[in-house]
Amino acid sequence: MEGETISLVIVCISAIISTSYCYYITSRIKAGVFRLLFVLPVCALFHAFPLFFSTLHISCCVSIFLAWLASFKLILFSFDRGPLFPLPSNIFRFICFTCLPIKAQQNPKPKNQIPKWVFPIKVAIFGVVLHRGRMSPDWARFLAVMATFIVSGVGHERKLSVNGVCHWSKNNETMTEITQGETISLVIVCVSAIVSTSYCYYISTRIKAGVFRLISVLPLEIVLMLVKLLVFIILGCDLEPQFNEPYLATSLQDFWGRRWNLMVTQLLKPAIYIPVWRLCNGRMSSDHARFLAVMATFIFSGVAHEVFFFTLTFEMPTGEVACFFVLHGVCTAAEIAAKRTEFVRRWRVSPTVSRLFTVGFVVMTSGWLLFPTAARSNMLDRAANEALLSIDFFKRTFDEWLVVFPSSYKKWHVQLDSLTNPCRSLILSRTIFLLLVISVSYCYYISSRIKAGVLRLISVVPVCAFFQVLPLFFTSLHLSSCLAVFLSCLASAKLVLFSFDKGSLFPLPSNIFRFSCFTCLPIKAQQNPNPKNQIPKWLFPIKVAIFAVVLHMYDYKQYMSPVVLLVLYTLHVYLELDIALMLVKLLVLITLGCDLEPQADEPYLATSLQDFWGRRWNLMVPAILRPAIYIPVRQFCRGLMSSDWATFLAVLATFVASGVAHEVFFFALTFEIPTGEVACFFVLHGVCTTVEVAMKRTEFVRRWRVSPTVSRLLTVGFVVVTSGWLLFPTLARSDMLEKLANEALLSIDFVKRTFYSFWW
């Protein structure tokens, strides 16, 4: 496995270098044959990459992603065609779009998107299929029959009734004829189901683990979906789907052209189909030219698949794979010709029947010509064994985590009663999660029953009280602090504002899932995102690296001066909070697919205390405190004093409320009597911010402005010094910082052990 890892690293580096070379030659060489000559060595190198691996999954992915798709993309790119034209905006996007089976989506259509619940269902089906070897043949036949009827039911439910009624109503027929048509369709469905069931019985008795045919489809679709998710996180752009539910295809043309492995279709169309059609169009009729172009595309695909199978099995090609694609090419061309006849136009088959015939034909021809090649070389067995090995590894890792994690905490002398008993911890977590879901759902549904005002507030207060006690159930500092911040502070404040139709939960989110996410997590949907103000993506890995260095510096704490320790503590608190919030944002971005407002805006660049607390540090808190404290106090005081004094008192009241909330937060984590230092820290910053706001309105400050560099140094220095004076002593006395560091180091060690055990 060590050699496999080294080969994977070498291939990745070589692919990046080769793709970068192709990116930069576009500015040196014009599109045409000359650029193609410079690209061909890279394509040849990509075809050699799969030979470096013995693991079937890795060699298969490298063969599909690089040897096949990337080579085609680069050849089309040589003539300014294909998915790489127009040229992506930067080299990173070019590398991703070249080496991965993805393409940016220009005009996404939400109505045509596949429901998100389909993907976990496919993963579950794949897990069942992998355990086929542990089932009896009777169970396998039962699952095959059920799958056949499910496909039939899906087609019937989605399109049969609507299309059947529309078809007969156009011909002004009676309801009796509709019933007869449905009866005929039902008979055909039953006959097709019997034939499919007999075939399933045949493959279950003749071919070992015949359900492995699903293994060739589901892993490919799951891997492509995971790649799409990964690139979506990194690039943040919409990507075209790789599959479009091929089991719903109503014809071979629909299956190969619009549903199965769409990236291949998009590459073969400009590379083979269009050139052959143009070449033949002047020498024969347009229809004959189109049929020849279809045949040429399938023949080329068959040859490419023969080469692909050879790189995986190292066995001499038998021609069966090529014959499979030639057969489908002939049938697809005949199908296109038949669709243009008057008979087919007048007598259309219902979608359910056409789906059954299409999918049945693909499955039967695959079992006849495609899968025997894979079966003879034990490819399907190897694929199943590797997948099962990966699942067993993750199970083993999880079991190890349940055993090792508590014992490691004992090693660090952290008394975590909830983690020393994993079963109790899991039961407690599930119970709290269930109560949390019930509480948030209750708040969501009362909005339609109770109008905004005091009555809704009274209904919400018990939920807020429940959120306050949730952190007390955990002794892990990270868990309790996250619950205290996310639920006890932010979620409670959001629900109080929601009682009066204010805050980030107003207007009401479109569904209960979004409402739960926006309530329980420190996020807010972004209405008008400004790309110019977005933080560069390369900053996040730099922060993670700095955070890792800070954690390991705690081993040398006894040799550090108080000033260095102060800087270390400040970096630790800031980086851990920023990284945790960024990970939450990424998770919700994947789940909800909407733009979210940033949680922080590089607070170390603040030029004043007003800029630090109002526009850069923990932006969700100012967004809550502004409508909850600042605006009501300012409106109340405006009737009693001048507008400036009302603003100053509102600022001071906001900081006092924040100080009291932080005292409660620290008490929930340390269970120590508050000393008032944390509240004094926020009161001091409130006074200084008020003075700063007043000073900015004087003529002297308007005329003599300090340079941004000096103001940044003074602002960040003041925050760090006052934190070391009033904030961090409370954390140091209760050993909170050491506990945070120990838990973070323990998590890193766990990830390292997991990675090493996976590869070695």
Image: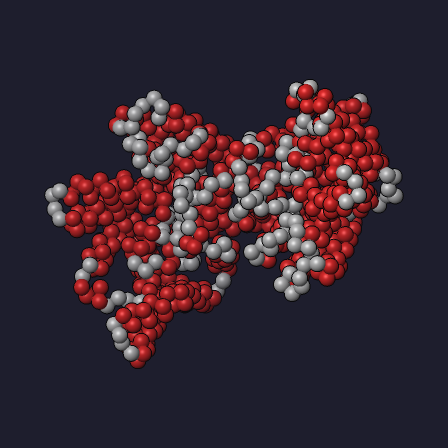
The residue sitting at 67% across, 43% down in the picture is 623
Q: Residue at x 17, y 51 (%)?
A: 287
Q: Residue shown at 73%/59% (left/top)?
A: 454
- Residue at 33 percent across and 38 percent down: it is 82
Q: Position of residue 714 (x, y in %)?
A: 73, 23
The percent coordinates of residue 291 (x first, y second) are 19, 50
**Looking at the figure, which quarter contains the C terminus?**
top right
The vertical placement of 296 against 601, above or below, is: below
630 or 586, which is in the foreground? 630
> Seen in the image, is 112 located left or right of residue 252?
right
Q: Place residue 171 in its image quadrant.
A: bottom left
Q: Toward the viewer: 611 or 191?
A: 611
For residue 527, which quarter of the picture?
top right
Residue nearest the viewer, comparing 688 with 663: 688
Q: Quadrant of residue 45?
A: top left
Farthest residue, direction left: 283
Nearer to the camera, 105 or 390: 105
**Where residue 339 sits: x, y (%)?**
22, 59
Q: Is residue 180 visible?
A: no
Q: Is residue 464 visible?
A: yes
